[in-house]
Image (spheres, rainbow, N blue to C red):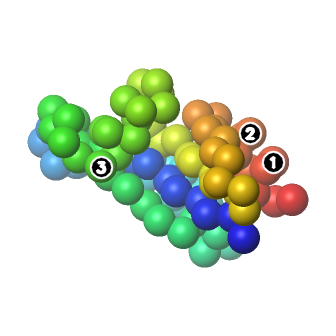
């Protein structure tokens, strides 16, 4: 079974990233939000936040992004919502 993590960003002022809100709304509208196993937050200015650490680990500098871990433990990173959608609909 695959495990899907979405990393979203929260701005310094506490507001959610506009692009992240859009992607979450799209996932909900397409009834695919339940395919996301975990949503992790990268808090701007807080490098100790889990999402920020995942971004650093995977060399990603924009949010949202997705990490899919397959049955063998292999991870695939998706920084493009459209590419992620193609993969998750399989």
**Residue drawn 66% across and 42% down?**
76
Q: Position of residue 64 (x, y in %)?
A: 48, 42
Instruction: Look at the numbered disc 2 and give the secondary structure of its residue.
Output: helix
Tell whether 53 sits left or right of 6.
left
Tell whether 86 sits left or right of 69.
right
Tell whether 37 sits left or right of 15.
right
Farthest residue to the right: give it.
90
The quadrant of the image that shows the C terminus is bottom right
Farthest residue to the front: give it.
72
Dot 1 or dot 3: first in sequence order is 3
Q: Position of residue 85 (x, y in %)?
A: 74, 50
What distance separates the C-alpha of mark 2 from that of mark 3?
23 Å
**Residue drawn 20% across and 35% down?**
47
Mark 2–mark 3 CB contact (< 8 Å): no
Quadrant in the picture for residue 1: bottom right
Work out whether 67 lies above or below 24.
above
Identify the residue position indicated by label 2 in the image: 83
Mark 2–mark 1 CB contact (< 8 Å): yes
């Amino acid at each position: 079974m695959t495990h899907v993590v979405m990393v979203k960003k929260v701005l310094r002022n506490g507001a959610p990233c506009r692009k992240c809100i859009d992607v979450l709304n799209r996932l909900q509208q397409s009834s695919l939000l339940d395919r996301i196993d975990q949503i992790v937050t990268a808090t701007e200015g807080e490098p100790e936040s889990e999402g920020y650490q995942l971004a650093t680990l995977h060399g990603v500098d924009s949010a949202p992004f997705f990490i899919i871990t397959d049955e063998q433990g292999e991870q695939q990173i998706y920084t493009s919502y459209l590419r992620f959608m193609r993969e998750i609909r399989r």
